[in-house]
Image (spheres, rainbow, N blue to C red):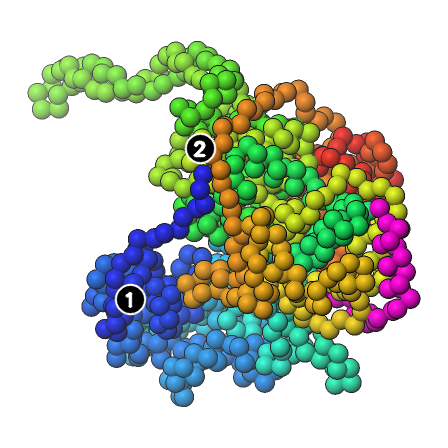
Amino acid sequence: MSEVQTVDNMVTISIDGIEYKAKEGEYILNAARANDVFIPAICYLTRCSPTLACRICLVEADGKQVYSCNTKVKEGMEVTVDTPNILEERRAIMEVYDVNHPLQCGVCDKSGECELQNYTLEIGVDSQSYMIPDTKREATNWSSVLHYDPGLCIVCERCTTVCKDMIGDAAITTTKRGGSEVDKAYKESMPKDAYAMWNKLQKSVIAPSNGTGETNCSDCGECLAVCPVGALVSRDFVYQSNAWDLRRVPAVAAHSSDGAQIYYEVKPTSIADRSEKIYRVTNEWSFVSLDGSARFAYDFENRGATKDEAAFNAALEAFKKAETVRFNSMITNEEAMMLQTLKEKMGLKLYNPEVRAFQKFLGHYTDASGASLYSTDTDAIMKKSDFVISIGAALRNDSPALKYAFNNVQKLNKGAGLYFHPVGDTLIPTFGKTVEVFNHKVGLEEAALYLVLDLFANKDKLPADVKDYIESFKSTETRTVKEQVMKTVKEMVKNEETGEEEEVSKKVKETVEKEVTVTINGLVNLLGADSEKFDDALAKMLKKKEAFSMMIGEDLYFHDKAENLAKLVALVEATCDIDVVMTPPKSNALGVALICDLDDEATGYTIGYNENGDFRLSGLGDGDLDMPAMNQQEGTLTSMGKRVLPTNAALEYGGYELNDIMKALVDAPEETIEWTAMLPVAKGFKAVEFDSLPNAFTNDGRDNRGYRLDVSAEEVELPAVEKFDEDAVLEGDIAYRCNPARQFNDFTDKSHEIFEAFALYASPEKAESLGERAEVVFENGSITLDVVADAKIQGDIVKVPDFKSAQDVYGLFGDSRYQTVTLRKV
Ligand code: SF4
Ligand code: SF4
Ligand code: FES
């Protein structure tokens, strides 16, 4: 299958008499923005559904007043942004927003970047025509990161909308405020949209949807990012800085492979201490949504490192006697290229277990498909897909971007979804009414892919043996079912007029039994669902669906049958109309997988780079030689979306870098970023200089950061796939290597706004049976952890995190993400 094409049909519209091209089906507001035309708008969020809360986006289209955020463009449409009536409405709306808004701009965290301030000035509100008694509204904390001040809230509903439509938690909602009623006399005297908006505004505030006063959500912070005023802010940022004092450094979120765009916002620590620190992370929220690690795990820098010459010389000696470098994915492409150069020039082994399994999987996939990389990405899925399938990923924990895409497809594209995973997650079924969850046994991931082939493959393209194998799971059964039929019965009725008895016919319902033949799909039952119910559900799910996509997760890379799974994925792409995205397991796993020839084991004297080793290079400040952390480095990262993205140093770093070691050991350029143009072209990288890489989105939301990897494709024969063993499943107590959401590595753990513990996560029932602390005994060792009940986990499988490298959890799990274990109360 080729790369997803997002070529749209275009129409011509005019705005204020000037002709523009616009995508067919686009809202007027988005079409205007894409063409650099400004229409005032407060409540609308690109990539979410319109809520019509603010009504300020009024325009005239073909002579009718409409809301530009929910009216679609049509060929030849004539749009006028400002008419006398619309200007009057907008002015009245802004006056209403300003009624009783507290006069605390001097200390408000949003001052200087507040949309209420901006629009009040833009629309020229210099007097107030309206008044109403105010009601006291107390500020409150909803979670460890969210602070809400309802007195500042303009009830635009951006926060609730982004949480529902994008993040998928739907953790906050509008609720009754108990405000004064708007004087009915205003109905006659003020513009009608402003009056309607004011009535709604007086009635509502925002609150956690579960009624507890606490959000118990993903703590992603996207709600506070989209808040146009100072109502919703990070608890940590309250009263810390004026917006205009902060310097924005464009960067890439360091901790997951989502490649999310961020700005580190920095300024001096204090009047006395002029060294800079990061005060917060912000994002272009119209085009990208962050997870909690991207937003809150920012203060992980290696502060105070100096050029320690003795440590540097010791490092050189260590490299000279080393056999292996052990490292992880918290490394730039340039550093990965340096390590690969060391391998080539000094014969060092490169050991990176979190990437090695992914690299092998990609290799098998390429052999089987002829394509150097998978065919789609999260942006394309959100824009186009209306049917998503997820296999082998704990979406909420592994890949926030894929979780958002899975949810967003349900909410915005009227989509449907299939979610295959052994660990139950209470959140996934809430994404949409047509989401089917298969909590299958561990080991049946091949069965999930065979079911996808069964449901979606063009059977003419499937090899005969695969077709026969799939059919072998089908059987028919004869069932006796009860059915209601209408039956005609005759009865004698007395004629009221003549008094005589007459025979009349009437229809009555009758229950009859009949025999039907039903087809049972053994694959569906094997995967833990009910074949008959699923058949009915699927028929509904497939209605009007056109664009299918599949998300593949880490469980498939760390799997005994990884090679067969990779071939099955290639077969799905070749025979079904389904585009595929794979989740690189950790931040720059895709970059490392493409750049480095990794080895299967570490031998001899080992240098650990942010990992265990005989000599440790560390960006965490706890090694034998300091290295810069990711927020102190310039370089590039390769994202799940197959983009090579530039990231910049937010903070100073005073110590040695990997390139200093390179310069001392082998031939190396003067600066780290000179390696950017040396990344391997044969693997899809481009020979371009770091400083020439673009780093922005276009106005219509296209990601124009860095560049896209070249993906090559060759014609190959369909892969020969193996059958699977239905009995090769794990039974008993099972541990799953899986981090809590927001925790990805030692660097997130170091950040002060990330609180999730290195603990054993279990469903509330399982946690109760385990008590406060438990020992998890593996074949080759054990680990003892506090037990944390996670209300979003269902079932008996427990989650063991891997984010602390010193614990070597990869060593305990080996080549699989699941292991049968013994769980002991401690
Ligand atoms: S932090 Fe994220 S999940 Fe929680 S309420 Fe805000 S947007 Fe929703
Ligand atoms: S908290 Fe902010 S984003 Fe949410 S409704 Fe109020 S003003 Fe809008
Ligand atoms: S932006 Fe259209 S109603 Fe608010």
Residue kind at label 1, given as amino acid type: Tyr
Residue beneath disc 2: 576
Q: Earlier in the sequence, mark 2 or mark 1?
A: 1
Task: Determine the CA span between mark 2 and mark 1.
Answer: 37 Å
Q: Is residue 618 left or right of residue 192?
A: right
**Alpha-carbon neighbours of circle 2 within 10 Å: few (<14), some, or many (≥20)?**
many
- Counting from the top left corner in percent of width and height, residue 606 is at 85, 48
Is residue 305 on the magenta stretch? yes
Q: Is residue 702 left or right of residue 661?
A: left
Is residue 386 on the magenta stretch? no
Where disc 1 sits, the SS reads strand
> Which residue appears at 79% of the width and 72% of the height?
654
Residue 642 vs residue 713, the one in the foreground: 713
Task: Using the image, determine if residue 164 lies above or below residue 550.
Answer: below
- Counting from the top left corner in percent of width and height, residue 661 is at 80, 61
Magenta span of residues: 300-323
Q: Based on the displayed image, in which of its 4 quarters is residue 304 positioned?
A: bottom right
Residue beneath disc 1: 20
Q: Which mark is residue 554?
A: none
**Alpha-carbon neighbours of circle 1 within 10 Å: few (<14), some, or many (≥20)?**
some
Where disc 2 sits, the SS reads loop
Which image quadrant: the N terminus? top left
Residue 218 vs residue 393, the one in the foreground: 393
Note whether residue 747 is visible: yes
Task: Using the image, determine if residue 670 lies above or below residue 75.
Answer: below
